[in-house]
Amino acid sequence: MLHIPQSIIDEMTAHARSLDPVECCGIMAGTTSGENAHVSHIYQIKNGDNSPVSYFMDPKELLWVHKNMRSNQLDLLVIYHSHTHTQAYPSATDVRLAFYPEAHYVIISLEMKDQPNIKAFRIVDGKIDSAELLVVNPSSK
Amino acid sequence: MPINVRIPPPLLPVTGGKSEVEATSSNIASLLEELETNYPGMKERLCDEQGELRRFVNIYVNEEDIRFLDGKETKLNEGDEVSIIPAIAGGS
């Protein structure tokens, strides 16, 4: 199961809202133990497409994030982006360009502006599977 | 001192789980061949049928994108660090 602290969910939501109607994108990293992935870091990454219908993570920032994760011994756990006008479900383009089968793909939909909808998926060999996402409140640890 | 090649998570199955491998090639084109020899299946993941680097694969030498250097002819020297990073992209 994917565990994400509320504070990181809040940061992703603020990131999505700040760029709306342009799609936001980024990476979450942390540690894995057995079937559980625990997110501890979020990296907002520039959307090189600067588009309301697509994203392309800035390659230079992506290189920096990979190095930072490596030096902090973090696993890449989540690839997130926003859908500013459609539901929280991977598009055909999302599936075609899903090169990280071990990662969770998290989509935040701003289709209903007052109620962001956040869903997690695995995309492996072109197949979409819903994944369980548990939002963790640090004070309840 | 060999060249250090950093392998991204999606390609770890090809290297048997090794996130860093060593190489001795003198440029990127021969590095791609060397990786294919040592880790069969690597080249088709990185290059298209014409042998050109796939659009959604980025290769960096010491943090410089080879597309802004000499592409596949980019020279490699002892101690260089090569990073392979698949693009992350999508659309709604």
Image (tube, coloured by chain):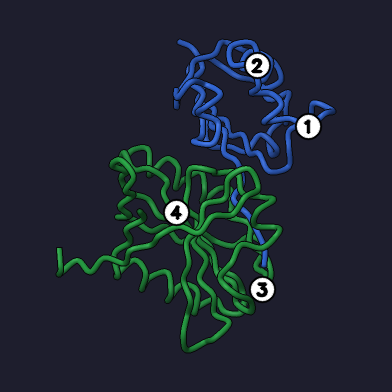
Chain colours: A green, B blue
User: What secondary structure is marked by label 3?
Assistant: loop
Q: Quadrant of the C terminus of chain A?
A: bottom left
Label 3 near label 4: C-beta < 8 Å?
A: no
Q: Which mark is residue A52?
A: 3
Please check whether the numbered discs 4 and 3 fall on a single chain: yes
B13, B22: nearer the viewer: B13
Badge 2 crowding class, 10 Å Cα cut-off, few under 14, some 14 to 19, many 20 or more, is some
Please check whether the numbered discs 1 and 3 fall on a single chain: no
Q: Label 2: which residue?
A: B36
Q: Which mark is residue A78?
A: 4
Residue A59, percent across and down?
A: 58, 48
Which chain contains the residue that carries disc 3?
A: A
Q: Looking at the image, which residue is at 42% across and 57% down?
A: A43
Residue A2, percent across and down?
A: 36, 55
Please check whether the numbered discs 4 and 2 fall on a single chain: no
Label 3 near label 1: C-beta < 8 Å?
A: no
Q: Earlier in the sequence, mark 4 or mark 3?
A: 3
Tally of numbered tags: 4
